[in-house]
Image: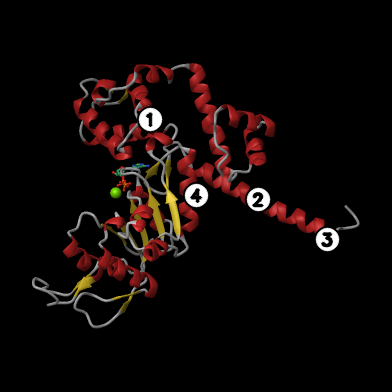
Amino acid sequence: QKPVDIDELGLIVRRAFHVRKLEQENASLAARGNDDGYILGDIITGAPEMLKIAQMVERVANTNASVMLLGASGTGKELLAKGLHDSSDRSDKAFVAINCAAIPENLLESELFGHEKGAFTGAIKTTEGKIEQADGGTLFLDEVGDIPLPLQVKLLRFLQERMIERIGGRKAIAVDTRIVCATHQNLESMISENSFREDLYYRLAEIVIKIPPLSGRSGDASLLARHFQKKFAAEINPAVKGLAPDALAALEAWQWPGNVRELENRIKRAVIMADGKLICAKDLDLEVDEDAATDLLNLKAAREAADRSAILRAISQTSGNISNAAKLLGISRPTLYDLLKQYKLQQAS
Ligand SMILES: Nc1ncnc2c1ncn2[C@@H]1O[C@H](COP(=O)(O)OP(=O)(O)O)[C@@H](O)[C@H]1O
Ligand SMILES: [Mg+2]
């Protein structure tokens, strides 16, 4: 419109850029949510809760920020750490993982920092530690809450100075290793008990990503079950061709305290145990509440679940913008608000 109002024009152009960016993000999200449900390489999901996490991981991948992955055991922390590495510009260098809880305290220092020949009895040759092995790449410190206090100090020094010293070494070595860590422990309470250093925590947790349990990912139990069924059938028992409806209902109703790892194990066992073409509920050894299982076959409940999932997906794709989410869903804003209330969905962004 003439005459041109410069402020207004600026606003319109900025808005156009913003809309374009949203469209691109939506397109890339849609492209990732393909039929097999693969995202970030090996991670399988169709759940908006996880797509959002994948988006976050991709955003932070190319920064050097240290990332802390929080989630219960079996939620895929290590897989996500690998996905982060693979989508970063460090992907052509090493991804090295170490489980701090699995290594005896007296060996952990040498595992992380390496040692010079003769540094201690049994140190027959100079050995690089994991931090050095991951130079240029990514080190995944699993169960970081289990690092003993003296070693926490040494790790902190590395994070501050980006230099390490091997045990028995006399020189500091510059190392460019990006740290991704994970724990299932409550580090905040460890900090208040003085068993985890607060300064180290802030160095490790520049970005914190909380991974939802499997029970909080709509539809993923079935999706993952099909994936593992195909995988283990091919490896172990090719006669098994699929999952019976009662097995699928049982899978959706189960709470999965051990998350994806438990699901993987149960499907593996079921593939071994199945005597027909299809895995049935009893092969999965799940004691499921019958009511909850039949609820999933109920049409009204199924529709509600589909609504819920579409709404969550739209909200996550629009980063919590209700107007844009309503547009994506093809409904009005007030209708979306009503549905959010009806389904008790929090309006988290
Ligand atoms: N979303 C997923 N898709 C496919 N496999 C998964 C997924 N999440 C976890 N897994 C598998 O489950 C197991 C446990 O995953 P892991 O990353 O070790 O979990 P955590 O480190 O959180 O305990 C691994 O075998 C992993 O490959
Ligand atoms: Mg793990």
**Would you name the residue on which mark 2 appears?**
20
Mark 2 touches mark 3? (CB < 8 Å) = no
Mark 2 or 1, closer to the camera: 1
Element on which disc 2 rests: helix
Residue at point 48% right, 43% down?
A: 51
Q: Residues within 10 Å of mark 4 (few under 14, many from 20)?
A: some
Q: Looking at this view, is 14 or 300 the one in front? A: 300
Residue at point 58% right, 46% down?
A: 319
**Image quadrant in which you'd find residue 165:** bottom left
Residue at point 54% right, 38% down?
A: 313
Left or right: where 215 falls relative to 342: left
Task: Measure the C-alpha gap from mark 2 to mark 1.
Answer: 34 Å
Task: Measure the C-alpha gap from mark 3 to mark 4.
Answer: 35 Å
Q: Which mark is residue 55?
A: 4
Mark 3 touches mark 4? (CB < 8 Å) = no
Amino acid carrying label 2: it is Arg
